Amino acid sequence: MGYGDTGYFTNIQRICLDYLTKNYDLCYLSAMHHKNHDLGADTIIVGSSHAMNGIIENELTLAGEVIQYCISSQDLYYDFEHIKKSVLKMKKPIKRCLINLGYYMLYQDLSLSTMVRVIIPSVYLNLFGETKYHNWPEAEKEDPLSKITFDEEMYPGELMGKLCEFWAEKALIEQSSYYGDLLARENCNMLGVKKVKWGSLSDADRRAYAENRVLNGHNKHIEHIKTREENGRILYDMVKFLADNNITTYFFITPYTDDYMRVIDLRYKDDIVKALSDLPYPVEFFDMNDIKQEFDDSDFLDSDHLNLQGAHKATALLNSFICMAEGE
């Protein structure tokens, strides 16, 4: 193949797509930070997959221009890193910050979770710098270009790295949401990869799935007392930082299925309410599980993540909550 062949340029497209696919979380978050720097935002959202799946940015109309920094398994430490970076690089003043919490979030530390902390070298060390390993000092930054293979004689690595970054950034800013033409929502969830729909499962299977996820996972976080103490300090520093920068702070929890709520340790919620009440700064708090009649199993991808239909509902509720809180 020669440099003048059409196949040469087809391969460039393949390399760029492969780069984005293998580094999607990094590319998405990086693009959103560039968007904040170049275009600005009225509202930023931080959190984990519950917000990533549950909130549709362009339907949050009362929040103005919205940028969401949410990926699966993200914890409070990295939520705060997004907030600091956003304020430092903002094109225009940010008016409000929406912080998504899972019930167990005050007890979660991504850097101590051997199952999912692999995203720290590939995502956060590239995004925030090599010292942002939190409680995993052995973590080493991973070169995103190392995840793909191509002929570096025909396509020099330094050149392709810049081209891949540039294209991914522009494409994801055009999409301006985690899901879209570049990544389909239905292909990105724990049951979806198995081609299973939550609503098609029997009552017994849904109950068993939720019990396994909660009893063997989420409920065990409550044992992490030292993590809870550290996250209490992070929570305080985060809210103080937002208040010092005149940014209104909202905390919200997306809805979960009845099967999930039946087994989740509700001491988590009591702890969240107390932690927020004890803050010396005003914050708003909205738990969508308090109005569960708005949702049923047809709104979920699995036991605790919303599908597109559920996301429309959750976004409308969050819109209304902002409206009431701000008296509009």
Image (cartoon, helix red, strand yellow):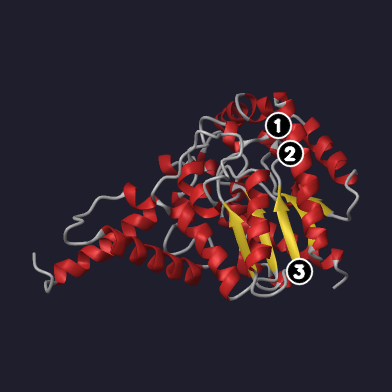
User: Foreground residue, 148 or 55?
Assistant: 148
Instruction: Specify the quadrant of the image occupied by residue 163.
Output: bottom left
Circle 3: residue type: Lys
Q: Which mark is residue 95?
A: 3
Percent across and percent down for residue 123 are 49, 49
Residue at x 61% of width, y 47% of height = 48
Looking at the rendered structure, the secondary structure element under dot 2 is helix
Q: Which mark is residue 231?
A: 2
**Crowding near pointer 1: few (<14 within 10 Å), some, many (20+)?**
some
Looking at the rendered structure, the secondary structure element under dot 1 is helix
Dots 1, 2 in contact, CB < 8 A: yes
Residue at x 46% of width, y 40% of height = 140
Dot 3 or dot 1, earlier in sequence: 3
Residue at x 73% of width, y 52% of height = 294
Dots 3, 1 in contact, CB < 8 A: no
Dot 3 or dot 2, earlier in sequence: 3
Percent across and percent down for residue 235 are 77, 45
Circle 1: residue type: Thr
Residue receiving disc 1:
227
**Crowding near pointer 3: few (<14 within 10 Å), some, many (20+)?**
some
In this view of the protein, can residue 203 be seen by the observer? Answer: no
- Most extreme residue toward the front is 131
